[in-house]
Amino acid sequence: MEIDPFIFRLSIFILSIFIGYYVVWSVTPSLHTPLMSVTNAISSVIIVGAIIAGLAGNYENIFNISSIFGFLAISLAAINIFGGFLVTQRMLAMYKKKKGKK
Amino acid sequence: MISANLSAVFYLISGVLFILALRGLSSPETSRQGNFFGILGMIIAITVTFLSIGNFSSGFVYVLFFLLIGGLIGAFIAYKIPMTAMPELVAGFHSLVGLAAVFVAISAFLNPEAFNLGFPGEIKLGSLIEMSIGAAVGAITFSGSIIAFLKLQGIMSGSPITFKGQHPLNALILISIIVVTYLLCSTQSSNLFWILLAISFLIGFLLIIPIGGADMPVVISMLNSYSGWAAAGIGFTLENTALIITGALVGSSGAILSYIMCKGMNRSFFNVILGGFGATEQSLSSQNKEQKPVKSGNAEDAAFLMKNASSVIIVPGYGMAVAQAQHALREMVDTLKKNDIKVSYAIHPVAGRMPGHMNVLLAEANVPYDEVFELEEINNDFANADVAFVIGANDVTNPVAKTDPQSPIYGMPVLDVEKCKSVLFVKRSLSPGYAGIDNDLFYKENTLMLFADAKKMTEDITKNL
């Protein structure tokens, strides 16, 4: 009997939870705010679903209800992607070591 | 057009890059590289999606258009936002992830052919379950984050809103979400899909309103976690590895942060979620308020004490953020350092309104991160320090948490500020902190209260040094 592809995705999911668990515990507490903003940005990879929805319309009917929701989701996710990564960048650029001490 | 297998490999690569992005945050030196990995992963995921659809004609221009609009808004916000407003920003961003998940679920429900999930009314059962979970969690994330945002922004009162029958009502709605999901999967009725979304929005709203302002670190972390699970639910629907990996990472990241925040307050997760903390104790403390002697001083006294100290520990809290005093504080510290006084910063895990909030503010004011310490690292140093300078913090220094089992904050880890030779307490009034309890520290022999705005007081002290 063949294994349902769902089981493979479930395996990826469960293993990723464990990876997440160990990786996040190793994040230094002083970077917890950038951690939140960067997780925000990467969870907006949901934009791939929005793009599929947005491109699903055909020539006659680009703006059917389904693709309109897709377009809206693209904008929302894009706000998060750009906003999230840029604000993280901005924060991380501020973390500096003491001058002269290596 | 690239093959499904090839695009799956690329999605896996971007998933791995996202893992590296979080991994980079283990130290400030590697963090910028980590952020770069995250951006790279995102670019790969988006490019591969375009290539795998291969339809560059009809909707493509519009997709780019909406992408650019969103991108411009996001970039604008990212450059304009003051660092003190990070909690609001993050809450706002969470709501957008939630809403995006809801929208994607809606379009997948209305047009399942585009996602290879079957036909309207005949969506594959597994996909429908995954879609419902993604949509419900997304909706909860959205409305919950909106409430958190309004509370943080001060548009909505930060005090908990409770009413009779709140918990049974919430339980009832949660059960009905499960029932509706079950019915939706067996009947494929679109009406039930909309009902599911509506009650999920409602429960998100109801879950957050009873939680008070200072519990926001937990709420934000929790919503962070929810947004991850919503993304993972959609990832299963779309059979997309990048989304599944990311959802799992974000979900567990938020859960760990909530755990750390709860531990910082010595409260169980359920205690925070059920809410209402601080509402009852407040009335109690105002009743037995007695006049106890307090020593108050001015900037000159404070400057004198610090000038004669050899080491000073600074304890910042949310009040510093409110007063925007971080730059003034760093100037004061620079002056102290010129006088060969050793200065370090002590940060309580729940100081501020989100995890790591104080660290970002100090970093913004050019405080080197190796002068900033966590509670466990620095707590033993208070006994050897001459002056503790508490600016905008209160409950996290209250010795009552160690001595009085009756106190609502008993058992919470606190900074041992009272062990310092002298304590300077910058505060606007004697009013109790968020937990609604008096701070014994105010009445200690070695405490000098400095009643003023945090920023103004810090500037005045600098002038007197």
Image (tube, rainbow, N blue to C red):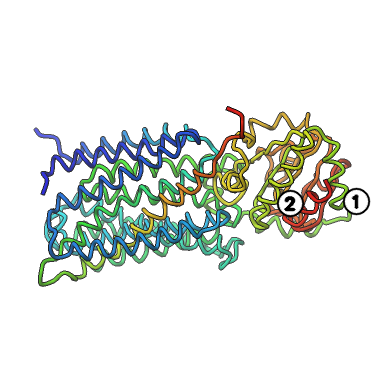
- Rendered residue at 27%/51% (across/down): B234
In this rendering, which labeled residue sits more in front, label 2 or label 1?
1
Q: CA distance from mark 2 to mark 1?
A: 17 Å
Q: How many marks?
A: 2
- Give the left or right position of residue B432, taking residue B178 as reference: right
Residue toward you, A79 or B398: A79
Can residue B304 be spotted in the picture? yes
Q: Earlier in the sequence, mark 2 or mark 1?
A: 1
The chain ID associated with circle 1 is: B
Q: Which residue is mark 2?
A: B437
The chain ID associated with circle 2 is: B
The kind of residue tagged 1 is Pro
User: Residue B213: horizontal and vertical position, in percent?
Assistant: 59, 57
Q: Quadrant of residue A10?
A: top left
Residue furthest to the top: A102
Residue B154, disc = none
Can you say whether B351 is above or below B113 in the image? above
User: Residue B464: horizontal and vertical position, in percent?
Assistant: 84, 49
- Rendered residue at 10%/34% (across/down): A2
Can residue B188 be spotted in the picture? no
Q: Quadrant of residue B246?
A: top left
* Residues tagged 2 and 1 counted as in contact (Cβ below 8 A): no
Label 2 sits on a secondary structure element that is loop
Q: Which residue is mark 1?
A: B293
The kind of residue tagged 2 is Ile
- Give the left or right position of residue B316, taking residue B387 as reference: left
- Rendered residue at 52%/64% (across/down): B150
Can you say whether B74 is above or below B28 in the image? below
